[in-house]
Image (cartoon, helix red, strand yellow):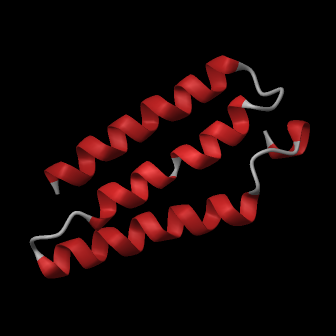
């Protein structure tokens, strides 16, 4: 997507993805926090960026489905 439509901003998206992993580790260590869920929700900002560009809607829908799967997996952990 980035090569064709120059969206999303890969630096910001990479930072958000790293935060998901870091937050999951913190949640596991703490045992009673939900920082990972917040980090997963922050991925929506990158998806909004895609929606506002020429990226086909079905690509964004697929990413949102994956985000939902990630939410479920994090809650199971």
Instruction: Tell me where residue 70 sits by quadrant.
Output: top left
Q: Residue at x 65, y 26 (%)?
A: 59
Q: Relative to 2, say whether 4 is above or below.
A: above
In the displayed structure image, the side of residue 77 where residue 18 appears, left or right: right
Location of residue 31 in the rendering, given as x and y in whole percent from the top left corner: 10, 74
Q: Residue at x 73, y 66 (%)?
A: 11
Residue 52, image x, y percentages: 75, 31
Residue at (30%, 45%) from the top-left corner? 71
Q: Residue furthest left?
A: 32
Give the image quarter of residue 2. Answer: top right
- Left/right placement of residue 71 relative to residue 4 reads left
Q: Nearer the viewer, residue 45 or 66?
A: 45
Q: Residue at x 60, y 69 (%)?
A: 15
Residue 56 in the image: above or below residue 25 = above
Counting from the top left corner in percent of width and height, residue 3 is at: 88, 44
Residue 61 in the image, given as x and y percentages of width and height: 55, 23
- Relative placement, left or right, of 30 versus 50 is left
Residue 57, placed above or below residue 37: above
Q: Is residue 32 left or right of residue 8?
A: left
């Amino acid at each position: 997507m980035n090569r064709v439509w120059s969206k999303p901003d890969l630096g910001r998206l990479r930072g958000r993805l790293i935060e998901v992993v870091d937050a999951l580790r913190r949640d596991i260590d703490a045992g009673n926090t939900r920082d990972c869920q917040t980090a997963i929700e922050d991925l929506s900002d990158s998806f909004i960026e895609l929606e506002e560009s020429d990226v086909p809607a079905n690509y964004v829908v697929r990413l949102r489905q994956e985000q939902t799967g990630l939410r479920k997996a994090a809650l199971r952990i």
